[in-house]
């Protein structure tokens, strides 16, 4: 999860702003990000709507800039390129600005064109930006294909299945897909968590599943055990399973998942902000549930995670611990009330 620091264009340091500190941005870089954001949202012309204004206020504050800066219009890709000399840093910038294109609950054609022009000027080719025409056309099958091929969770799960179980594991995955797989011993182990004392992670997991009518791993229709991290992270972080809570969890995953992490953001933007049915059939889409401040807070929290929860970690060892103890073990102890977390810098 460690990532390289972007070469600085100046020596202004990283003063102020949780996002600026977490990403290790210089003053020049922070200003460049905000300028690019203003240029993209300003492409619509006319007065900015409230969601956009809120996004600008959040960006200004968390980039450590003074007030809600004015401006907009043209942005010079050459200046952006000097601020972000690495390909990876430029790609991060372009991908992040996709949120601004979709923030009003629809894909803005003018903002999309502005971002595409900026990407061309920076020499960036982003598979997520290339999905925006399908988002705009509400082409759900194309979106599903595009996201599925880039999902870090799916790629890693199938890689683990092959490495740990070979052909048998892949066959078992097919049974999961058909809802036919059962593991009575595993199901009993999960059901036994109900006997753990109140306040423990194990007891909280039982409450989470029972309250929502979810099926335990090992039971018919239950999720694969290798995907249990999803519901465990709901419990550990206190994120609800409503659309807004799923957006928060996507932000958390984006903070730690490494390559392809922005797939999580694209998935919830499509499903819970644009109302596109691109997630599994049991997931009901929604419109307008993506709250940038809550997602940003979750992203920063995810960057503090010290355990690879999508890998072969022993979560059973945490079940008897209190929620606070389990969080501390994972490096995600209770977050502060404001957006003040920091982690390793992004490229």
Image: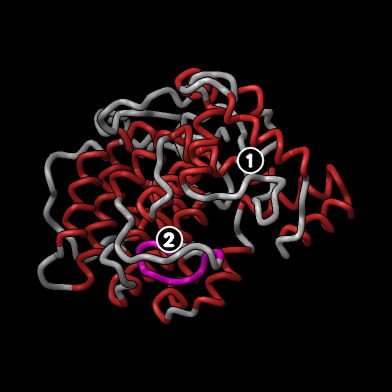
Q: Which residue is mark 2?
A: 122
Magenta-drawn stretch, dominant element (helix, strand or loop): loop
| Residue drawn 46% across the image and 26% down it | 332
Q: Is 142 situated left or right of 118 in this image?
A: right
Residue 210, how many percent across, how many down?
Answer: 51, 43
Q: Quadrant for the N terminus, please.
A: top right
Counting from the top left corner in percent of width and height, residue 246 is at 43, 51
Residue that label 1 marks: 310
Find numbered disc 1 in the image and state the secondary structure of the residue it sits on. Answer: loop
- In the image, residue 20 sits, relative to residue 119, either above or below, namely above
Q: Earlier in the sequence, mark 2 or mark 1?
A: 2
Q: Position of residue 180 (x, y in %)?
A: 76, 60
Using the image as rendered, state which of residue 161 and residue 223 is in the foreground.
223
Crowdedness near tag 2: few (<14), some (14–19) or many (≥20) residues, C-alpha within 10 Å: many
Q: Could you say which quadrant of the image residue 96 lies in?
A: bottom left
Residue 273 belongs to the span the image colors magenta: yes
* Residue 127 visible in the picture: no
Q: Is residue 258 above or below residue 242?
A: above
Q: Does the magenta segment cover residue 196?
A: no
Q: Nearer the viewer, mark 2 or mark 1?
A: 1
């Amino acid at each position: 999860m460690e990532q390289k620091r972007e070469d600085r264009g100046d020596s202004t340091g990283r003063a102020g702003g949780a996002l600026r500190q977490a990403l290790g941005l210089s003053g020049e870089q922070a200003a460049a990000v905000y300028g690019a954001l203003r240029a993209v949202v300003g492409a619509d012309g006319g007065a900015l709507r409230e969601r956009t204004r809120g996004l600008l206020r959040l960006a200004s504050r968390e980039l450590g800039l003074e007030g809600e800066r004015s401006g907009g219009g043209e942005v010079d890709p050459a200046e952006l390129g000097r601020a972000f000399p690495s390909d990876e840093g430029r790609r991060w910038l372009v991908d992040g600005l996709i949120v601004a294109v979709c923030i009003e609950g629809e894909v803005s054609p003018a903002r999309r064109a502005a971002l595409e022009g900026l990407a061309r000027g920076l020499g960036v080719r982003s598979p997520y930006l290339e999905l925006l025409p399908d988002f705009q056309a509400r082409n759900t099958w194309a979106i599903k294909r595009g996201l599925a091929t880039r999902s870090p969770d799916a790629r890693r799960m199938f890689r683990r299945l092959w490495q740990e179980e070979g052909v048998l594991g892949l066959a078992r995955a097919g049974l999961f897909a058909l809802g036919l797989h059962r593991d009575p011993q595993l199901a009993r182990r999960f059901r036994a968590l109900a006997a753990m004392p109140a306040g423990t992670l194990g007891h909280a997991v039982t409450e989470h599943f029972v309250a929502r009518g979810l099926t335990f791993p090992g039971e018919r229709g239950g999720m694969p055990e290798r995907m249990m991290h999803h519901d465990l992270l709901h419990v550990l972080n206190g994120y609800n399973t409503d659309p807004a809570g799923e957006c928060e969890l996507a932000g958390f995953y984006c903070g730690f998942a490494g390559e392809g992490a922005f797939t999580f953001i694209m998935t919830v933007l499509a499903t819970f902000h644009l109302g596109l049915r691109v997630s599994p059939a049991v997931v009901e889409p929604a419109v307008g549930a993506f709250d940038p401040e809550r997602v940003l807070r979750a992203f920063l929290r995810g960057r503090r995670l010290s355990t690879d929860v999508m890998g072969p970690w022993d979560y059973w060892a945490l079940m008897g611990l209190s929620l606070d103890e389990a969080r501390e073990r994972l490096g995600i102890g209770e977050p502060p009330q404001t957006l003040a977390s920091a982690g390793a810098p992004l490229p």
